[in-house]
Image (cartoon, rainbow, N blue to C red):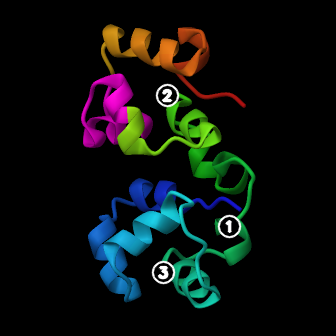
Amino acid sequence: MKNHIYMLRKKRGIKQYDMARALGVSPSYLSKIETDSQEPTERFKVNVAKFLKTSIEKLFNDLPVEEIFPEFSTGLTNKLWAKRREMGIKQYDMAKKLKVSTPFLSKVELGLLEPTDEFKQLASKVFKMEQSELFLATVQY
């Protein structure tokens, strides 16, 4: 089962290290949970839901994030994060494929940084999607 921790954390401007410490876990553990590399404990689910002020059901499910959290239905400019997660590719690995840093990719995925045309072309090739499908003014699902 997937989770929406990463997107909520980033949208709210919370650093992974700070959130991990607040939850009493290591940043590496939080990272593994965010990337679905490790199954969280029930106690962790309760604590993270309380920290993010949401329910466990909303946080841990296979639905697209924008269906659960309306704030994600507007303002997104691309489908990079959704497609990368759908393909099961870690952000670090995707950044290497796209020849950019992980922080750069993170900012582009969140719509905080406008990518270059060269980046858009390469991303379209990597994701095997038309550029117009991957990069939109507003993401439509």
Residue found at x 41% / y 34%: 94
Residue type at mark 3? Phe
- Which residue was labeled with disc 2? 77
**Residue that mark 3 sits on:** 51
64 displayed left or right of 125: right
Write the start and end of the magenta stretch as one range.
95-114
Q: CA distance from mark 1 to mark 2?
A: 24 Å
Q: Is residue 91 magenta?
A: no
Secondary structure beneath label 2:
loop
Neighbourhood count class around disc 3 (C-alpha, 10 Å): few under 14, some 14–19, many 20 upward: few
**In the depicted structure, whether residue 80 falls above or below residue 3:** above
- Label 1: few (<14), some or many (≥20) within 10 Å? some
Q: Is residue 122 above or below residue 5?
A: above
- Magenta: predominant secondary structure element? helix
Please indicate whether residue 68 sits to the left or right of residue 83 in the image.
Answer: right
Question: Could you tell me how far apart the alpha carbons at marks 1 and 3 are, in whole angstroms?
Answer: 14 Å
- In percent of the image, x 50 and y 14: which residue is there? 124
Residue visible at 37% across and 26% down in the picture: 97
In the image, 94 versus 111, the foreground residue is 94
Q: Is residue 120 above or below residue 51?
A: above
- Tell me if 11 is positioned left or right of 37 in this view: left
User: Closer to us: mark 1 or mark 3?
Assistant: 1
Q: Is residue 8 left or right of residue 57?
A: left
Counting other residues with Cα less than 10 Å from the Cα at mark 2, is it few (<14), some (14-19), or many (20 or more)? many
Q: Is residue 84 visible?
A: yes
Quadrant of the image occupied by residue 107: top left
Q: Is residue 136 visible?
A: no
| SS of the residue under disc 1 | loop
Regarding mark 3 in the picture, which secondary structure is present there? helix
